[in-house]
Image (cartoon, grey):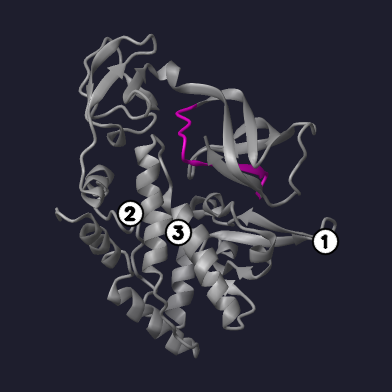
Amino acid sequence: MKLHNESTKQECSDKICCMSSDAEDARSVCHRLGFNFYVFNYISDFQQNVIEKFVRSYEIGETPNPCIDCNRFIKFGKLYQRALELGCSYVATGHYARIGFDSNTGRWLLKKSLNESKDQSYVLYFLTQEQLAHTKFPLGEFADKQMVRDLADKYGFINARKGESQDICFVPNGDYTQFIRSYNCRDYPSGDFLNSEGRVLGTHKGLICYTIGQRKGLGISYSEPLYVCQKSVLDNTVTLGTERELYRDSLTARDFNWISIPEPSVGDEPIRATVRTRYHGKEAEAFVTVNGDGVVTIRFIEPQRAISPGQAVVLYNNDMVIGGGIIE
Protein backbone atom coordinates (compact mmCIF):
# COMPACT_ATOMS: atom_id res chain seq x y z
CA MET A 1 0.00 0.00 0.00
CA LYS A 2 1.28 3.46 -0.84
CA LEU A 3 1.65 5.98 1.96
CA HIS A 4 0.57 8.83 -0.30
CA ASN A 5 -3.07 8.71 -1.34
CA GLU A 6 -2.61 10.35 -4.74
CA SER A 7 0.18 7.91 -5.63
CA THR A 8 -2.14 4.99 -4.99
CA LYS A 9 -4.90 6.55 -7.08
CA GLN A 10 -2.50 7.16 -9.96
CA GLU A 11 -1.33 3.57 -9.70
CA CYS A 12 -4.97 2.43 -9.97
CA SER A 13 -5.52 4.74 -12.94
CA ASP A 14 -2.50 3.35 -14.74
CA LYS A 15 -4.04 -0.15 -14.51
CA ILE A 16 -7.49 0.65 -15.86
CA CYS A 17 -6.54 1.09 -19.49
CA CYS A 18 -7.11 -1.76 -21.87
CA MET A 19 -4.25 -4.20 -21.94
CA SER A 20 -1.80 -3.48 -24.74
CA SER A 21 -2.84 -6.78 -26.32
CA ASP A 22 -6.46 -5.55 -26.44
CA ALA A 23 -5.39 -2.39 -28.22
CA GLU A 24 -3.32 -4.36 -30.70
CA ASP A 25 -6.26 -6.70 -31.38
CA ALA A 26 -8.44 -3.66 -32.09
CA ARG A 27 -5.76 -2.20 -34.34
CA SER A 28 -5.57 -5.47 -36.28
CA VAL A 29 -9.33 -5.60 -36.85
CA CYS A 30 -9.44 -1.94 -37.93
CA HIS A 31 -6.63 -2.55 -40.40
CA ARG A 32 -8.46 -5.55 -41.85
CA LEU A 33 -11.63 -3.47 -42.28
CA GLY A 34 -9.81 -0.44 -43.65
CA PHE A 35 -10.74 1.78 -40.67
CA ASN A 36 -8.62 4.51 -39.15
CA PHE A 37 -7.44 3.53 -35.68
CA TYR A 38 -7.32 6.06 -32.84
CA VAL A 39 -6.45 5.79 -29.17
CA PHE A 40 -7.86 8.40 -26.78
CA ASN A 41 -6.76 8.86 -23.18
CA TYR A 42 -9.73 9.07 -20.79
CA ILE A 43 -7.97 7.81 -17.68
CA SER A 44 -8.77 10.87 -15.55
CA ASP A 45 -12.42 10.78 -16.66
CA PHE A 46 -12.61 7.07 -15.84
CA GLN A 47 -11.12 7.64 -12.43
CA GLN A 48 -13.51 10.48 -11.61
CA ASN A 49 -16.75 9.12 -13.07
CA VAL A 50 -16.31 5.39 -12.52
CA ILE A 51 -13.72 4.51 -9.85
CA GLU A 52 -14.32 7.46 -7.51
CA LYS A 53 -18.08 7.01 -7.83
CA PHE A 54 -17.72 3.28 -7.15
CA VAL A 55 -15.78 3.96 -3.96
CA ARG A 56 -18.12 6.74 -2.77
CA SER A 57 -21.17 4.54 -3.32
CA TYR A 58 -19.79 1.78 -1.14
CA GLU A 59 -18.88 4.32 1.53
CA ILE A 60 -22.48 5.57 1.76
CA GLY A 61 -23.85 2.04 2.03
CA GLU A 62 -24.83 1.43 -1.59
CA THR A 63 -23.91 -1.38 -4.00
CA PRO A 64 -22.93 0.33 -7.27
CA ASN A 65 -22.67 -1.03 -10.80
CA PRO A 66 -19.51 0.58 -12.27
CA CYS A 67 -20.09 -0.99 -15.69
CA ILE A 68 -23.19 1.19 -16.08
CA ASP A 69 -21.20 4.30 -15.20
CA CYS A 70 -18.45 3.31 -17.65
CA ASN A 71 -21.01 2.96 -20.42
CA ARG A 72 -22.77 6.18 -19.45
CA PHE A 73 -19.85 8.52 -18.90
CA ILE A 74 -17.04 7.04 -21.01
CA LYS A 75 -18.44 5.06 -23.96
CA PHE A 76 -21.60 7.10 -24.50
CA GLY A 77 -20.24 10.27 -22.95
CA LYS A 78 -16.64 11.08 -23.83
CA LEU A 79 -16.26 8.63 -26.73
CA TYR A 80 -19.61 9.55 -28.27
CA GLN A 81 -18.69 13.24 -28.14
CA ARG A 82 -15.31 12.54 -29.75
CA ALA A 83 -17.03 10.60 -32.53
CA LEU A 84 -19.21 13.62 -33.29
CA GLU A 85 -16.13 15.83 -33.38
CA LEU A 86 -14.57 13.45 -35.90
CA GLY A 87 -17.67 13.71 -38.10
CA CYS A 88 -18.88 10.16 -37.48
CA SER A 89 -22.57 9.52 -38.15
CA TYR A 90 -22.80 6.58 -35.74
CA VAL A 91 -21.07 4.88 -32.86
CA ALA A 92 -21.15 1.07 -33.09
CA THR A 93 -20.44 -1.01 -29.99
CA GLY A 94 -20.44 -4.68 -29.07
CA HIS A 95 -23.37 -4.47 -26.66
CA TYR A 96 -26.07 -7.11 -26.88
CA ALA A 97 -29.13 -4.91 -27.39
CA ARG A 98 -31.20 -3.52 -30.27
CA ILE A 99 -32.38 -0.09 -31.35
CA GLY A 100 -35.70 0.63 -33.04
CA PHE A 101 -37.80 3.62 -34.03
CA ASP A 102 -41.51 4.18 -33.36
CA SER A 103 -42.87 6.22 -36.27
CA ASN A 104 -46.13 6.82 -34.38
CA THR A 105 -44.46 8.54 -31.43
CA GLY A 106 -41.28 9.71 -33.15
CA ARG A 107 -39.20 8.14 -30.40
CA TRP A 108 -36.12 5.93 -30.63
CA LEU A 109 -36.40 2.67 -28.71
CA LEU A 110 -34.00 0.46 -26.77
CA LYS A 111 -34.87 -3.24 -27.03
CA LYS A 112 -33.52 -6.50 -25.68
CA SER A 113 -31.04 -8.54 -27.66
CA LEU A 114 -32.32 -11.49 -29.67
CA ASN A 115 -29.89 -13.49 -27.54
CA GLU A 116 -31.61 -12.97 -24.19
CA SER A 117 -28.92 -14.81 -22.24
CA LYS A 118 -26.46 -12.09 -23.34
CA ASP A 119 -28.90 -9.16 -23.20
CA GLN A 120 -27.34 -5.92 -21.95
CA SER A 121 -30.30 -3.55 -22.25
CA TYR A 122 -30.31 -3.27 -18.45
CA VAL A 123 -26.93 -1.51 -18.42
CA LEU A 124 -27.97 0.90 -21.20
CA TYR A 125 -31.15 2.37 -19.68
CA PHE A 126 -29.56 5.86 -19.51
CA LEU A 127 -29.30 6.34 -23.31
CA THR A 128 -30.88 9.53 -24.61
CA GLN A 129 -32.94 9.94 -27.75
CA GLU A 130 -29.99 11.64 -29.46
CA GLN A 131 -27.58 8.86 -28.52
CA LEU A 132 -29.97 6.14 -29.66
CA ALA A 133 -30.41 7.90 -33.00
CA HIS A 134 -26.65 7.76 -33.62
CA THR A 135 -25.78 4.34 -32.21
CA LYS A 136 -25.69 0.84 -33.68
CA PHE A 137 -25.65 -2.48 -31.81
CA PRO A 138 -24.97 -5.07 -34.53
CA LEU A 139 -24.53 -7.98 -32.08
CA GLY A 140 -28.07 -7.54 -30.78
CA GLU A 141 -29.42 -9.05 -33.98
CA PHE A 142 -27.67 -12.40 -33.40
CA ALA A 143 -29.55 -15.04 -31.43
CA ASP A 144 -26.41 -17.06 -30.73
CA LYS A 145 -22.89 -16.01 -29.68
CA GLN A 146 -21.34 -18.79 -31.73
CA MET A 147 -22.75 -17.17 -34.87
CA VAL A 148 -20.84 -14.00 -33.98
CA ARG A 149 -17.60 -15.87 -33.44
CA ASP A 150 -18.02 -17.80 -36.70
CA LEU A 151 -18.60 -14.58 -38.63
CA ALA A 152 -15.55 -12.93 -37.04
CA ASP A 153 -13.54 -16.04 -37.91
CA LYS A 154 -14.77 -15.91 -41.49
CA TYR A 155 -13.44 -12.37 -41.89
CA GLY A 156 -10.13 -13.20 -40.25
CA PHE A 157 -10.48 -11.14 -37.07
CA ILE A 158 -7.65 -11.95 -34.70
CA ASN A 159 -9.98 -11.82 -31.67
CA ALA A 160 -12.65 -14.17 -33.07
CA ARG A 161 -12.08 -16.79 -30.35
CA LYS A 162 -11.02 -14.45 -27.57
CA GLY A 163 -12.44 -15.18 -24.13
CA GLU A 164 -14.95 -12.89 -22.45
CA SER A 165 -14.15 -10.72 -19.46
CA GLN A 166 -16.50 -11.24 -16.50
CA ASP A 167 -14.79 -9.12 -13.83
CA ILE A 168 -14.81 -5.38 -13.17
CA CYS A 169 -11.75 -4.23 -15.07
CA PHE A 170 -10.16 -2.29 -12.20
CA VAL A 171 -10.84 -5.05 -9.62
CA PRO A 172 -9.77 -8.13 -11.62
CA ASN A 173 -9.48 -10.37 -8.53
CA GLY A 174 -13.00 -9.47 -7.38
CA ASP A 175 -11.87 -8.26 -3.93
CA TYR A 176 -13.80 -4.96 -3.81
CA THR A 177 -13.14 -4.42 -0.11
CA GLN A 178 -9.38 -4.61 -0.41
CA PHE A 179 -9.45 -2.42 -3.50
CA ILE A 180 -11.39 0.34 -1.70
CA ARG A 181 -9.12 0.19 1.34
CA SER A 182 -5.99 0.38 -0.81
CA TYR A 183 -7.42 3.09 -3.04
CA ASN A 184 -8.22 5.39 -0.12
CA CYS A 185 -5.29 4.27 2.05
CA ARG A 186 -7.63 3.85 5.00
CA ASP A 187 -9.57 1.25 6.87
CA TYR A 188 -13.25 1.37 7.78
CA PRO A 189 -14.43 1.10 11.39
CA SER A 190 -16.17 -1.96 12.74
CA GLY A 191 -19.65 -1.63 14.21
CA ASP A 192 -22.66 -3.54 15.42
CA PHE A 193 -24.63 -6.25 13.72
CA LEU A 194 -28.26 -5.72 14.74
CA ASN A 195 -31.42 -7.73 14.30
CA SER A 196 -34.63 -6.10 13.09
CA GLU A 197 -35.58 -5.25 16.68
CA GLY A 198 -32.29 -3.43 17.30
CA ARG A 199 -30.64 -6.09 19.45
CA VAL A 200 -26.86 -6.41 19.03
CA LEU A 201 -25.87 -9.75 17.48
CA GLY A 202 -22.15 -9.20 17.02
CA THR A 203 -19.53 -7.00 15.38
CA HIS A 204 -19.13 -6.29 11.67
CA LYS A 205 -15.82 -5.55 9.90
CA GLY A 206 -16.86 -2.29 8.20
CA LEU A 207 -19.85 -1.30 6.06
CA ILE A 208 -17.99 -1.68 2.77
CA CYS A 209 -17.63 -5.43 3.43
CA TYR A 210 -21.34 -6.16 3.03
CA THR A 211 -24.08 -6.04 0.41
CA ILE A 212 -27.84 -6.47 0.73
CA GLY A 213 -28.77 -10.16 0.61
CA GLN A 214 -25.30 -11.36 1.65
CA ARG A 215 -25.26 -14.52 3.76
CA LYS A 216 -21.67 -15.79 3.77
CA GLY A 217 -18.87 -14.26 5.79
CA LEU A 218 -21.03 -12.80 8.57
CA GLY A 219 -19.55 -14.89 11.38
CA ILE A 220 -22.84 -14.96 13.29
CA SER A 221 -24.37 -18.12 14.78
CA TYR A 222 -28.15 -18.12 14.85
CA SER A 223 -31.07 -20.53 14.91
CA GLU A 224 -31.66 -19.95 11.18
CA PRO A 225 -29.64 -18.42 8.31
CA LEU A 226 -29.22 -14.63 8.49
CA TYR A 227 -28.78 -12.18 5.64
CA VAL A 228 -27.78 -8.53 5.32
CA CYS A 229 -31.05 -6.59 5.15
CA GLN A 230 -29.94 -3.00 5.71
CA LYS A 231 -26.83 -0.86 6.21
CA SER A 232 -26.80 2.45 8.10
CA VAL A 233 -24.00 4.96 7.62
CA LEU A 234 -25.45 7.22 10.34
CA ASP A 235 -24.75 4.79 13.18
CA ASN A 236 -22.41 2.39 11.33
CA THR A 237 -24.68 -0.63 11.80
CA VAL A 238 -25.59 -3.61 9.64
CA THR A 239 -29.05 -5.07 10.18
CA LEU A 240 -29.39 -8.81 9.72
CA GLY A 241 -32.59 -10.72 9.19
CA THR A 242 -34.09 -13.98 8.04
CA GLU A 243 -34.91 -14.82 4.43
CA ARG A 244 -38.45 -13.46 4.75
CA GLU A 245 -37.10 -10.11 6.03
CA LEU A 246 -35.21 -9.58 2.76
CA TYR A 247 -38.42 -8.94 0.82
CA ARG A 248 -39.75 -5.46 0.00
CA ASP A 249 -42.92 -4.45 -1.78
CA SER A 250 -41.71 -1.07 -3.09
CA LEU A 251 -38.71 1.10 -3.87
CA THR A 252 -37.87 4.64 -4.94
CA ALA A 253 -35.39 5.42 -7.71
CA ARG A 254 -33.52 8.60 -8.63
CA ASP A 255 -32.01 10.02 -11.85
CA PHE A 256 -34.72 8.36 -13.91
CA ASN A 257 -34.37 8.32 -17.70
CA TRP A 258 -37.41 7.68 -19.91
CA ILE A 259 -36.89 6.12 -23.35
CA SER A 260 -40.00 4.67 -24.98
CA ILE A 261 -42.29 7.37 -23.56
CA PRO A 262 -41.89 11.02 -22.54
CA GLU A 263 -41.46 11.61 -18.81
CA PRO A 264 -44.90 11.25 -17.17
CA SER A 265 -46.26 14.04 -15.00
CA VAL A 266 -46.85 13.92 -11.27
CA GLY A 267 -50.41 12.70 -10.72
CA ASP A 268 -50.63 10.65 -13.92
CA GLU A 269 -52.11 7.17 -13.74
CA PRO A 270 -49.54 4.55 -12.61
CA ILE A 271 -47.68 2.78 -15.39
CA ARG A 272 -47.80 -1.01 -15.36
CA ALA A 273 -44.50 -2.62 -16.32
CA THR A 274 -42.20 -5.52 -15.62
CA VAL A 275 -39.21 -4.47 -13.56
CA ARG A 276 -35.66 -5.73 -13.21
CA THR A 277 -33.73 -4.72 -10.08
CA ARG A 278 -30.42 -6.43 -10.89
CA TYR A 279 -28.44 -7.43 -13.97
CA HIS A 280 -30.00 -10.58 -15.47
CA GLY A 281 -32.48 -10.65 -12.59
CA LYS A 282 -35.98 -11.99 -13.07
CA GLU A 283 -38.51 -9.36 -14.08
CA ALA A 284 -41.42 -8.67 -11.73
CA GLU A 285 -44.72 -6.93 -12.38
CA ALA A 286 -45.19 -3.53 -10.78
CA PHE A 287 -46.90 -0.15 -10.91
CA VAL A 288 -44.78 2.97 -11.43
CA THR A 289 -45.65 6.52 -10.36
CA VAL A 290 -43.67 9.73 -10.83
CA ASN A 291 -42.78 11.83 -7.78
CA GLY A 292 -41.01 14.62 -9.67
CA ASP A 293 -37.38 15.77 -9.90
CA GLY A 294 -36.36 12.53 -11.61
CA VAL A 295 -37.62 10.33 -8.75
CA VAL A 296 -40.16 7.53 -9.17
CA THR A 297 -41.89 5.06 -6.86
CA ILE A 298 -42.24 1.44 -7.93
CA ARG A 299 -44.75 -0.81 -6.12
CA PHE A 300 -44.48 -4.52 -6.81
CA ILE A 301 -47.45 -6.82 -7.15
CA GLU A 302 -45.43 -9.44 -5.25
CA PRO A 303 -42.60 -8.48 -2.81
CA GLN A 304 -39.09 -8.71 -4.21
CA ARG A 305 -35.95 -10.10 -2.59
CA ALA A 306 -32.80 -8.16 -1.65
CA ILE A 307 -33.46 -4.83 -3.34
CA SER A 308 -30.11 -3.03 -3.17
CA PRO A 309 -29.64 0.77 -3.11
CA GLY A 310 -27.13 1.83 -5.77
CA GLN A 311 -28.19 -0.80 -8.29
CA ALA A 312 -30.16 0.10 -11.40
CA VAL A 313 -33.88 -0.55 -11.75
CA VAL A 314 -35.14 -0.89 -15.33
CA LEU A 315 -38.72 -0.97 -16.61
CA TYR A 316 -39.76 -3.16 -19.55
CA ASN A 317 -42.75 -3.57 -21.81
CA ASN A 318 -42.08 -7.04 -23.27
CA ASP A 319 -38.70 -6.63 -25.03
CA MET A 320 -38.71 -2.82 -24.94
CA VAL A 321 -37.07 -0.64 -22.27
CA ILE A 322 -39.46 1.99 -20.90
CA GLY A 323 -36.81 3.65 -18.75
CA GLY A 324 -34.63 3.23 -15.70
CA GLY A 325 -32.88 4.84 -12.75
CA ILE A 326 -30.84 4.17 -9.60
CA ILE A 327 -32.43 2.55 -6.55
CA GLU A 328 -32.46 4.79 -3.50
Q: Which residues are magenta?
A: 305-320
Say which residue appears at 70% left-offset and 57% top-offset: 109
Mark 1 sits on what residue? 103
**To which residue does mark 2 refer?**
167
**Residue 272 can be seen, yes or no:** yes
Q: Which residue bears the numbered disc 3? A: 70
Q: CA–CA distance between discs 2 and 1?
A: 39 Å
Secondary structure at numbered mark 1: loop
Q: Amino acid at mark 3?
A: Cys
The CA span between labels 1 and 3 is: 31 Å
Vertically, is 206 above or below 99? above
Q: Secondary structure at mark 2?
A: loop
Q: How many marks?
A: 3
Is disc 1 in contact with disc 3, using a CB cutoff of under 8 Å? no
Q: Nearer the viewer, residue 27 or 289?
A: 289
Q: Which residue, as the protein is rendered here, is positioned at the far right?
A: 104
Report the front residue among 6 and 41: 6
Q: Name above or below for residue 8 compared with residue 216.
A: below
Q: Nearer the viewer, mark 1 or mark 3?
A: 3
Q: Residue at x 42, y 64 (%)?
A: 45
Camera-nearest label, 3 or 2 = 3
The mark nearer the N terminus, 1 or 3, is 3
